[in-house]
Each structure stands twice: as structure tokens, then as C-alpha cells.
Amino acid sequence: MVLFQSRHFGRRRGLSPGTLLNDAEEQAAFRLIRYGTEGILENRSLNISDLPVEETADSVNWIQMKGVHDSAALKSIGDAYGIHALTLEDIQNTDRRPGFDSFGDKLFVTTKRLLEGDAFSNLGAESISLILKGRTVISFLESSSMGHAGLEAILDQTGGQLKKFGADYLAYRIWDDSIDTWLHSIELSEDEILTLEENVLFHYRDSLTEDIHEARKKMAWLRWTFRPFRDLRSWLQKFSSAHFSNNVEPFLLDLSDHVNRVSDLLDLYRDMTDDLMSMLIAVQSNRMNAVMKVLTIIATIFIPLSFIAGVYGMNFARMPELAWRWGYPAALGLMGLTALGMLIYFKVKKWL
């Protein structure tokens, strides 16, 4: 599939805005990681009754919710932290494109993280939403999400900026982590596209048309999904001062540079896949021309041979060569010399 739409997407049609859908097979899980300059202070599972979690001046609360289609749990965390129903709907709609919204003292971000496959054509995507409010970050993960294992591993290490800065830096790192997956995964496309190009030029096969078409559809989906990120710099200029400290703003500008790099790579690879289709059409045309050239040469050679055979096949009673002992071998020899002479002529003209 090129457009990754969840099985919940179509069920929203006809429902009122802010309506949450419930998946009876899915049960949300909550987890709290409280950390400070000294490291992880608390790492435990949460119950809905534990929300909201009390904030302290010297620590950061990182609440993780996994399983956004448990509507009761999602509504409970929304009530605990004053999250609007429309925002909860956006969190649950994992097909939503990346975006940013600011509501008073809360920042809402939806981002897309690419899931690595063994090839560019096997890439997948998952939605990650987060809310930054004071010294608390709430991240919302799909039930199939791999979580934030990389960031949690960094927290387990001694030292590091993640422990020195506040919740705004954690929100930035979650955001940056998702962008890094784009940089790493999209680079897989370069090897695949170059392989396709080599196959088009030197190892042509009929399935190449389908392979190139799939690569173009995948690249179109990637560009469509990533397009909202291109507004990052203008969004930062408008809202960053309200939610991020001066210490974190330089990192956001660096994140904007990463976004520009991904955007440039997507444009480059889109052009490369488009060129591949044009190249394939040209190769197919050249192969057809080569076949037509051979067939034309064969037909051209047989035109005089057919003329000679036609002359001696008229069966007139007074044809002098009919009674000649060497007439048949002579006719065959004339045909052979004619064909050989034409081949030599084509070779001299560099038509062969």
C-alpha cells in the first residue's frame, strides 16, 4: 500500500466533530517517566486514576499513552489535562498529516515517524502526537508503535542534555527523533533508484515498468505526508517563543535545517523516479527500433530474392534457362550473391 490509512479512518464519516471511536480489542497503557538532572527519578506504569501527575520544579514528567483507540482512556487523559475534544480526535486519527497547534499554555504536535524496512519499497509510517504543558510532556502512540526506546536509552545514560533541559527540550527531541527516521529511511531510496536505473539501462525486464511505478507512488506519498513539515520555520517564528526557552530555540532552528534537507531529498528522488520512467520509455523505444531494424533488413534482402524466384517461377514455355542443366544452381547462386552484396552495402553504410 502506498497511502497508509488505518482501518478506523472510514468510520469517521458522518460523525460529529470531536467524536472518539472505540476499539473494543484495544486497551490503552499509561507510563510515567519522571527525570531530572540526577537521572530517572521514577519509571512506572500509571492508572487513569493517577492523572493528572503532580509537577515539580526540578523534574520533568513524561507520560506515555499507548493505544489511542481506547476512547475511554483517551477522554480521561483529556479531562485530566484540559485537552479539547477536537484535539483528542486529531490524536486518535492516526491518518492525520503532521501539524502544529497552540492552545493557550498547551502545544499540540502531530508528527510522522518512518518505520524501517529492508528496502525502500517496504517503508511504513506511524503517527506520534504530543502535548507540551508546563513541565509535562504527554506522548500518544499507536498500539503498533515501537515506542521511544532510543530516547529512553539516552535517559538511562549518565550526563547528556536531555536531563539538563526542561520539558520543552524533551518535546524537541521527540520531534527530532521522528525527523531523523525520515533522513535515514529516505536514503534507502537512493540505492534502490540507482539499482532501478542500472536495470533499465543494462538489465531490462518487463517488470521494470511496475517497479518504477511503485517507486513513483511511494515517493508521491512521502512528499505528500512530509509537506506540512515545510511550514516548520514559519511556525517557529510565530509560536516558539511561547512554548520553548531561549536555550532550546537554537535546536529548533537546527531541526528546521533537517526538515529542509529531507524536503530537498524528496524533491531530488521524485525527479529521479520521473526520469526513470522517461528513460524506460526511451529504452523500450530503442529496443523496438532495433527489432524493427533487423526485420526491415531481412525484408529488404528478401525483396530481390523474391523477384528472382518470381521470374523463374512464371513457367513460360520458352524461358531459355528452364532447359539449362545449371539453371537451378545458378539461380540459387545469384540469390546468395545478391544477399551478400546487400549485407556488405549495409555494413559500409553503417546500417548494421
Image (cartoon, helix red, strand yellow):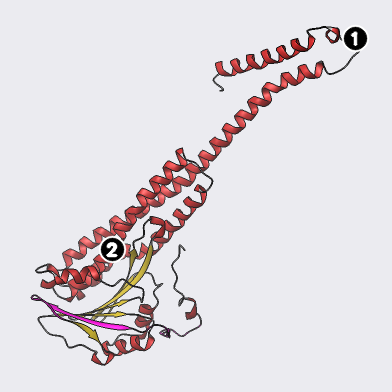
Q: Residue 316 magenta-drawn?
A: no
- Of residue 269 and residue 239, the one placed in the foreground of this image is 269
Q: Which residue appears farthest toward the right when viewing the image?
A: 317
Q: Residue at x 41, y 57 (%)?
A: 121
Compare residues 199 and 224 and report the one nearer the observer: 199
Magenta segment boundaries in residue numbering = 14-42
Q: Is residue 93 or residue 347 the one in the foreground?
A: 347
| Mark-to-mark CA distance, 2 and 1 | 92 Å
Q: Residues within 10 Å of mark 2 (few under 14, many from 20)?
A: many
Q: Which residue occupies 48% across, 46% down?
A: 277
Q: Is residue 21 left or right of residue 149?
A: right
Q: Which residue corresponds to mark 2?
A: 179
SS assignment at label 1: loop
State the residue position of label 1: 318
Residue 341's image quarter? top right
Can you say whether 152 is above or below 194 in the image? below
Q: Can residue 253 be seen?
A: yes
Mark 2 lies on a secondary structure that is helix
Say which mark, if any, is on residue 198. Answer: none
- x and y percent of residue 200 in the render? 46, 42
Q: Residue at x 28, y 66 (%)?
A: 178
Residue 155 location in percent, x, y? Answer: 16, 71
Residue 216 sits in quarter: bottom left
Say which amino acid is labelled 1: Arg
Q: Is residue 300 left or right of residue 128?
A: right
Q: Magenta stretch: residue 30 in it?
A: yes
Relative placement, left or right, of 16 versus 306 is: left
**How many tags in the picture?**
2
- Please state the horizontal and vertical placement of residue 54, each as a whole percent of the image: 17, 88
Q: Is residue 102 above or below residue 268?
A: below
